[in-house]
Structure formats: structure tokens, C-alpha cells
Image (spheres, grey):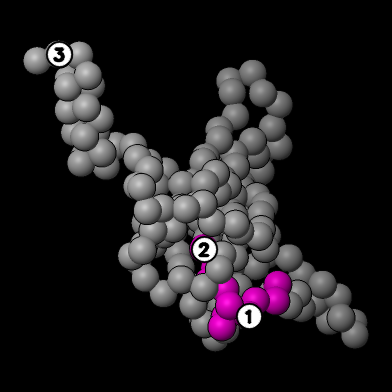
């Protein structure tokens, strides 16, 4: 077997195993807008979520939100970012509870093919010598993409 054949076999094997974000010929990059990202969510577990409706969005926002605003003398959860669900789909990635600051999560790449969206999520951790806040954190990232009703695959 010559070298190009071996290389082709290795690349095909890696793609088949799902160990890489191998690009498909029919995929195209998706433009997304960041709705909110931060370090303090009430969602304590690492999650990946797709939201397709206003009611589901409001329910999730209530569970997630730790921020409080004082409105007419009362503490209230602020309204969620506006989303037109006839035009957009929400993708959410949470890192889960961490014992300190310095952790983050973000969407690094989103690609769409005919039947699915692949969202690549990047997670960061503090180094051993990094100065971080000594507080419990729960990092998250929320983005909106153009409407997609098919499968969504999250890759870390």
C-alpha cells in the first residue's frame, strides 16, 4: 500500500469513529449570535440543549438565571434575550458546577449539512498558577442559529 492510500484509510477511520469534526462536502458554516455567556448559571450539570419554542425558552431561562434586577422595588429575574423562533433555534452548552472561577465554555464552530447541525463546543480550565475567584461557578454559553428542525450533534 502506498502512503496516500494509508493516509486516506486513517482519515476515513477517524471520521467513522467520530473522533474528529471531519468536514462533510455538503456542510457549510453557520453564523450564530451570542445571546448570553457567563460563569454563574443555576444549571449545575454539564448539558447540551436545543430549544425550539418560546415556552421552552422561558422555562429554561427561569431555571438557569441567577441574576436579579430590582423592578418596582422587587427583585425579579430579567427578561430573556428576544428570539424569533420562526427564524431561529437556540443552542445551549453548560459546563456544570465548578469549585472556582477560571472555567469557561463557548461555541467554537457550527456547521450545517442537509440533515444536521454539528456544534463544536470548546471548554477551558484554569492553569495551576492562574489566579481565579474562589467561588462556585457554573459556566454557560447560549447562542441562536438560523432555524433548524433536524438533528443537532454537539462535539466537545
Say whether disc 3 or disc 2 marks the residue closer to the N-terminus: 3
The residue singled out by tag 2 in the image is 91
Q: Nearer the viewer, residue 156 or 32?
A: 32
- Which numbered mark, 3 or 1, is in the foreground of this view? 3
Query: Which stretch did the figure color magenta?
Result: 81-91
Numbered-mark total: 3
Q: Do the residues bearing badges 3 and 1 touch, measured as CB atoms within 8 Å?
A: no
Q: Position of residue 148 (x, y in %)?
A: 46, 71
Residue at disc 2, secondary structure: strand
| Horizontal and vertical percent position of residue 105 | 56, 45
Q: Which residue is mark 3?
A: 2
Q: Farthest residue toward the top? A: 2
Which residue is pictured at 73% across the width and 65% down the height?
67
Residue 144 placement, left or right of 51? right
* Mark in the foreground, 1 or 2: 1
Of 154 and 55, nearer the camera is 154
Q: Nearer the viewer, mark 3 or mark 2?
A: 3
**Residue 83 falls within the magenta-colored stretch:** yes
Quadrant of image for the N terminus: top left
Provide the residue designation for mark 1.
Answer: 84
Q: Residue furthest right?
A: 72
Amino acid at each position: 500500500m502506498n502512503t496516500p492510500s494509508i493516509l486516506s484509510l486513517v482519515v476515513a477511520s477517524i471520521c467513522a469513529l467520530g473522533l474528529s469534526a471531519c468536514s462533510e462536502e455538503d456542510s457549510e458554516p453557520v453564523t450564530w449570535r451570542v445571546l448570553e455567556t457567563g460563569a454563574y448559571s443555576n444549571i449545575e450539570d454539564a448539558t447540551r440543549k436545543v430549544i425550539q419554542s418560546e415556552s421552552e425558552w422561558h422555562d429554561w431561562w427561569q431555571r438557569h438565571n441567577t441574576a436579579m434586577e430590582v423592578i418596582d422595588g422587587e427583585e425579579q429575574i430579567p427578561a430573556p434575550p428576544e428570539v424569533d423562533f420562526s427564524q431561529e433555534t437556540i443552542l445551549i452548552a453548560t459546563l456544570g458546577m465548578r469549585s472556582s472561577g477560571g472555567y469557561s465554555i463557548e461555541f467554537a464552530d457550527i456547521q450545517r449539512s442537509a440533515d444536521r447541525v454539528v456544534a463544536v463546543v470548546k471548554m477551558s480550565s484554569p492553569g495551576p498558577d492562574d489566579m481565579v475567584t474562589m467561588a462556585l461557578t457554573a459556566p454557560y454559553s447560549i447562542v441562536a442559529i438560523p432555524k433548524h428542525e433536524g438533528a443537532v450533534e454537539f462535539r466537545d
